[in-house]
Image: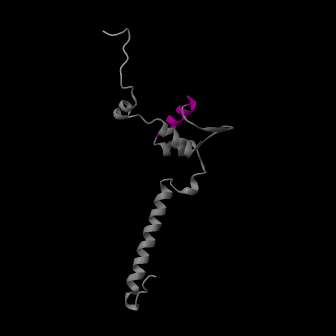
């Protein structure tokens, strides 16, 4: 059980609580500002929101849509994006390091045309 503060320590304890609550409020506001609010995960993004999420220009996103290079959904004349699909799309473009490529490569080299 937590220690009950004495009357003399009460102002200090109240100040500690105030500091903690302020920190929590700032943290939640930053999460909301950066689009990391869990309640927004089910929301679909528009083209400008997807561009901001990806760090791309709006016109670049329209070009990717036109070339069918980005996952999107169209309803009538509107385009929507799933945040989870965009994240997976970004992650699918990950390039392997030289060490990863070397680890996956076959240990022996096959020569064409026989031995030389």
Taking the view exactly as shown, the residue that stands out farthest to the left is 116
Q: Is residue 5 left or right of residue 48?
A: left
- Note whether 107 is above or below 61 in the view shown: above
Residue at 39%, 85% (x, y): give it: 11
Q: What main secondary structure does the magenta stretch of the protein show?
A: helix
Residue 57: in sight, yes or no?
no
Image coords of residue 39 (percent x, y): 58, 57
Q: Which of these two is toward me, 71 or 61? A: 71
Residue 101 lies within the magenta run: no
Q: Is residue 41 left or right of residue 28?
A: right
Q: Which of these two is toward me, 87 or 34? A: 87
Question: Which of the 4 quarters of the picture holds residue 111?
Answer: top left
Q: Which residues are magenta?
A: 56-68
Residue at 42%, 84% (x, y): give it: 3
Residue 57 lies within the magenta run: yes
How many numbered marks are there? Answer: 0
Image coords of residue 56 (percent x, y): 47, 40
Q: Is residue 101 left or right of residue 64?
A: left
Quadrant showing the C terminus: top left
Q: Which of these two is toward me, 15 or 79? A: 15
- Note whether 24 is above or below 10 in the view shown: above
Question: In the rendered view, how is the structure colored?
Answer: one colour
Image coords of residue 65 (percent x, y): 56, 33
- Note whether 46 is above or below 16 in the view shown: above
Taking the view exactly as shown, the residue that stands out farthest to the right is 76
Residue 91: in sight, yes or no?
yes
Residue at 46%, 72% (x, y): give it: 21
Image coords of residue 51 (percent x, y): 51, 42
Q: Which of these two is toward me, 6 or 60? A: 6
């Amino acid at each position: 059980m937590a220690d009950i503060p004495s009357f003399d320590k009460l102002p200090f304890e109240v100040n500690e609580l105030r500091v903690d609550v302020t920190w929590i409020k700032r943290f939640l506001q930053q999460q909301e500002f950066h689009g990391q609010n869990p309640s927004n995960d089910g929301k679909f993004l528009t083209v400008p929101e997807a561009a901001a999420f990806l760090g791309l220009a709006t016109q670049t996103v329209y070009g990717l849509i036109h070339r069918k290079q980005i996952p999107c959904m169209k309803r009538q004349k509107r385009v929507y994006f799933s945040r989870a699909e965009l994240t997976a799309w970004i992650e699918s473009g990950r390039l392997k390091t030289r060490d990863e490529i070397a680890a996956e490569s076959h240990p022996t080299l096959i020569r064409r045309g026989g031995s030389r």
